[in-house]
Image: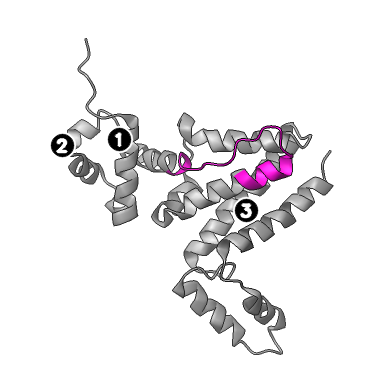
């Protein structure tokens, strides 16, 4: 009979997420996770397959935090908005994990629940096959791009000192050469949620107009 397991998958995920939140990507190591859980590194190898396994723990933990109102009967656009915002909120709550979210692909079932819900909402628009895939890539790309832009301080969002500084500098550009950039800088709301929703509505209007 195999020995009982000391840690649950949920415990490992929570510890890995706390670790990257506090220490960043460089702090995410087998030894650090073992220390946080009060055990030895070799014990962690019984649960996690090296660095890739650590990163999967983090991405799964982040995606499992995406929650939205469950309304299967609602309009597909409303459901896409709710699910997309839930995913974005979960991702931006853990900025140190954003590089992993953008590059890693987790097959953890809990992590795939938001993705499946988003694809189902898009499918309810009448899409299938390649058209459904394209729609999913567009929406998921918007979520990832918005989160990444916020992380790097681009002026799509001024939630944070760095982004605000960049926006202010844009507003001071030579007016004759960069009138539209200046206009955009002045239009920045300082409210990432409002800007996210505005951009998503534009995207959904395009998807709605191109339903097969």
Identified at 84% across, 38% down, the residue is: 212
Under circle 2, the secondary element is loop
From the image, which quarter does the N terminus lie in? top left
- Residue 75 covered by magenta stretch: yes
Quote the CA–CA distance across marks 2 and 3. Answer: 41 Å
Numbered tag placed on residue 109 in the rendering: none
Numbered tag placed on residue 11 in the rendering: 1
Identified at 65% across, 57% down, the residue is: 197
Q: Is residue 107 at least partly visible in the picture?
A: no
Residue 194 sits above or below residue 16 on the image: below
Mark toward the start of the polypeptide (2 vs 3): 2
Residue nearest the observer in this picture, 202 or 57? 202
Residue 125 sits above or below residue 103 on the image: above
Residue 190: percent from left, percent from top: 56, 71
Mark toward the start of the polypeptide (1 vs 2): 1
Task: Write down the residue under mark 3.
Answer: 142
Mark 1 is surrounded, within 10 Å at the Cα level, by few (under 14), some (14 to 19) or many (20 or more) other residues, namely: few
Residue 12: percent from left, percent from top: 30, 36
- Residue 180 covered by magenta stretch: no
Region in magenta? 62-82
């Amino acid at each position: 009979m195999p020995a009982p397991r000391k840690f649950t998958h949920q415990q490992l995920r929570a510890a890995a997420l706390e670790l990257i939140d506090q220490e960043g990507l460089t702090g995410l190591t087998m030894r650090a996770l073992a220390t946080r859980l009060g055990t030895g590194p070799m014990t962690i190898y019984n649960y996690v397959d090296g660095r890739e396994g650590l990163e999967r723990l983090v991405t799964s933990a982040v995606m499992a935090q995406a929650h939205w109102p469950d309304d299967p009967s609602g309009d597909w656009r409303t459901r896409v908005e709710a699910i997309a915002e839930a995913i974005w909120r979960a991702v931006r709550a853990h900025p140190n994990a954003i590089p992993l979210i953008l590059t890693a692909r987790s097959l953890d079932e809990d992590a795939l629940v938001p993705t499946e819900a988003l694809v189902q909402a898009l499918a309810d628009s009448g899409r299938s096959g390649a058209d459904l895939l394209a729609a999913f890539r567009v929406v998921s790309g918007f979520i990832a791009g918005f989160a990444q832009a916020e992380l790097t301080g681009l002026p799509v969002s001024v939630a944070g000192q760095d982004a605000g500084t960049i926006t202010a500098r844009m507003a001071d550009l030579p007016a004759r050469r960069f009138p539209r950039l200046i206009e955009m800088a002045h239009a920045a709301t300082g409210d990432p949620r409002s800007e996210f929703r505005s951009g998503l509505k534009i995207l959904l209007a395009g998807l709605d107009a191109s339903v097969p």
